[in-house]
Amino acid sequence: MLSNNHNNSPPTPRTRLERLLRERELRRSNRSSSLNEEARDVYSLGEVNSYDLFTYAGDSCGSFNEEDVLDRISVVKDIFDGFQRPEGKTPKQRLLVVANRLPVSAVRKGKETWHLEISVGGLVSALLGLKEFEARWIGWAGVNVPDEAGQRALEKALAEKKCIPVFLDEEIVHQYYNGYCNNILWPLFHYLGLPQEDRLATTRSFQSQFDAYKKANQMFADVVNKYYEEGDVVWCHDYHLMFLPKCLKQHNNTMKVGWFLHTPFPSSEIHRTLPSRSELLRSVLAADLVGFHTYDYARHFVSACTRILGLEGTPEGVEDQGKLTRIAAFPIGIDSDRFIRALKLPQVQDHIKELQERFAGRKVMLGVDRLDMIKGIPQKILAFEKFLEENPKWRDKVVLLQIAVPTRTDVPEYQKLTSQVHEIVGRINGRFGTLSAVPIHHLDRSLDFHALCALYAVTDVALVTSLRDGMNLVSYEFVACQASKKGVLILSEFAGAAQSLGAGAILVNPWNITEVAASIGYALNMPADERERRHHHNFMHVTTHTSQEWAATFVSELNDTIVEAQIRTRQIPPLLPIREAVNCYSHSHNRLIILGFNATLTEAVDALGRRYDQIRDMDLKVHPDVREPLKKLCDDQNTTVVVLSGSERSVLDDNFGNYNMWLAAENGMFLRPTKGEWMTTMPENLHMDWVESVKHVFEYFTERTPRSHFELRETSLVWSYKYADVEFGRLQARDLLQHLWTGPISNASVDVVQGSRSVEVRAVGVTKGAAIDRILGEIVRDKGINKPIDYVLCVGHFLTKVYTNIFIKDPVMFFLFPCTVLINSPVMLQDEDVYTFFEPDLPSKVPPAARTVITNPFGGAPAPKNPNNGVSPSRSARLKKQRSLSILERRANSHGSAVFWRPVVQDRLSLHEGSSVLDLKGDNYFSCAVRRKRSNARYLLGSSDDVVTLVKELSECSESNLS
């Protein structure tokens, strides 16, 4: 390695993991180092005040002196190349945090006077240590400000706290926040379902609430766009702003946008009940990085995108037309140091002594919850009652302290829940209480920070029995305060924290009252050594995975995702310059246009809308808007049009029988001018003896996979599960491939192509890339072309085949890699070779198709070696070997028959003759992929509608030339 004489910075990280690990180490080292004098001058008093803003009310720890603040500042270093700036300083990256509510609540004191009250929340705490970024918070201030003077005054007051308000009127708040967010999305995401009231007004108001939701999100986007600067990171939070990523990307596609959900994300079966399900999913997918608390939520989101939108889920995220949205789990934490330090404060110690004296001789159990339906408070209290019933000896030795913080007290359902809890508590206290003590202490209020820390410290068993919870940080706070007590945590398996603290906690199903009661007994009788081991595991996790580390990791991943997206984007071909393509067409004299059929000349379909119309989707029809211009194009004597498709001959006959063009069916294996008869371009050594056995396998899997089907063609068989359940279909496809490799094609010369939702078995050499040589030669011979072809346009949605030259003999390894086609040659002909065949200066890397032999991963006869020893032959040598085997097929049976045959060679034509008529310059060749961003083509077209536009302009050009 070359030495660096200029600085001692480490080498540039190359992979995403290297970059993220290095940034993590930088963050840790920076936090532990003190700031130099130069950096002290940079840190202004305004930033100190900003830090004080994000502290909890009533916490004396929030009053930091200057040294405490400076200890939390980290010097940001360049992540990717370790470059040191001359001044020794790196400018902070701006971070725009967009949430529904600001970390302060505004109270109006006069016409232009506002009082700001500090809010409490896990997200606020999470951003305490993010001093690597210059953070700004954008959100609703929680108050309606109709007059401009009041808005200006509030903006000025909030600007001192680095907050930017979004002004929402009362109607928007009612429809957007109280309506769609709290009445529809929140219950649905917590598995409570959509509102089931008898009042039909609820259903009728869905659309109006959703319209208000979109309008509110656009208002947030307008504020972000106003304050956004190039290079800023925009971090959107929670279900209130699911439409925001789309709004931001529509305004500026280069904006760095991340979105994080703080609640559970339900399974796809729950989410699909939402009327606006698709719009919300696509809006979130506009973000670059989407984060969840647990892997389960991330998996549910990917599944929803797959099942509802029909998109492809990958280990990295969700891919849509080449655009990858990363989906990952980022478990949030707490500021554990704050709780640990608080235990040493005098006021907290006084609270601890008071509680110890009050509950002397009794074990203390604690529950701290918001009084909400999802927190499982009634189930918790009923489980405690059952424990007292079954364990009379514990009745005067244990006490349950339940802190229930009131919320949404004006909602009837919450009022009913409050009455229910009070009734149960009263019954249990009346049944098991005495004149001097009661088993349950229930408080309908919140505690200040010091009292809560003291309560955590004296607790022996914490009960967190959420019926469904995004994370639940009460469990984290309890663990952070248990350094001396080492109490036991009983945790619901339906809380997100169970994924992080499950090994050290006792996991329970809160609906199983008997199980929770038994867990209470086990926790109270747990040996000291087991309690210590469990606490140690949880404590290490809580103190390591802090809220600051969570936020820094998310932003780090977002930045790195942008880097990877930029690399990926550079590999994506640009959009087709239609005007340039038409201009070259008009100045050429002999043109060749090759068009695909399905997804190219067919009408554009909506993945969701046509998903359940299987019969219509299978009946392929030409786009109605392309018929007339395509006919004009075909009638141009200087233009030869070829439709190259994988469909059967009957399908092409039905759609193009009246056009003056060439039809190439079944990937180019059958060819005819529309005024002539079908001929075959098949290789003479084509063997089809594997067909019947593969057909039996496909029939079997069609029967056992609902909504799947298979197509029997003359040179291939295709099994499709496009309309089946996607995840089940993938499992079936993997099983189908295993059946094929172990039996029907173990020693057959075939290609296996696995599409996004299909498996195709073809005879070797049956590809569009191999057929284009022969098709061109046949066209030259038939038309007697004697002047050079000086313009070629090739447009299609052609499949790319993925290969490996690794021999896998172990069936287990093949099971792990089912999408890989195993061959013995490193390079093979593929459909997309149509694009590269006409490249004027591109050296060919394609060996003869006849030499390709499939390797059986489960054993079998060894494959022959490549006679060229891996050296790619020249184009001329390849063209001599791949001779055109054009044969006129005359059969007694109709071409739609499923009878297979072996072709008889009647004539041969050297493709050298066909290629010799090509006189292309780089500017006169346009290869274009449709709806496929990863392609060997030069250009892209977004959909078949764009193909219609292109064909129309070419036809108009042809008409003008004729006139």
Image (tube, rainbow, N blue to C red):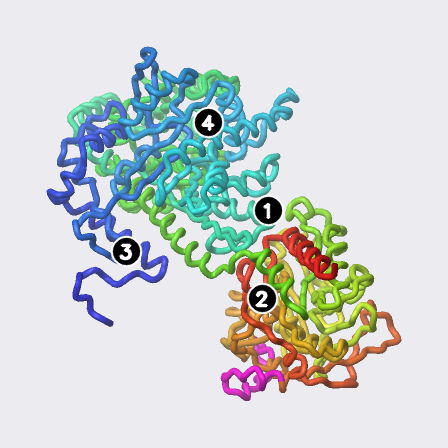
Q: Is residue 70 left or right of residue 440?
A: left
Q: Which mark is residue 382?
A: 4
Number of residues whose C-alpha sits closer than 10 Å to that of mark 3, classed few (under 14), some (14–19) or many (20 or more): some
**Amino acid under disc 2:** Thr
**Amino acid under disc 1:** Leu
User: Where's residue 836, x and y in %?
Assistant: 57, 71
Q: Earlier in the sequence, mark 4 or mark 1?
A: 1
Q: Earlier in the sequence, mark 2 or mark 1?
A: 1
**Amino acid under disc 4:** Leu
**What segment carries the magenta color?**
853-879
Give the mark toward the camera: 4 or 3. Answer: 3
Give the mark toward the camera: 2 or 1. Answer: 2
- Residue at the outermost top position: 110
Number of residues whose C-alpha sits closer than 10 Å to that of mark 4, classed few (under 14), some (14–19) or many (20 or more): some
Decide if residue 343 is in sight here.
yes
Q: How many marks?
A: 4
Read off the residue under disc 1. Answer: 309
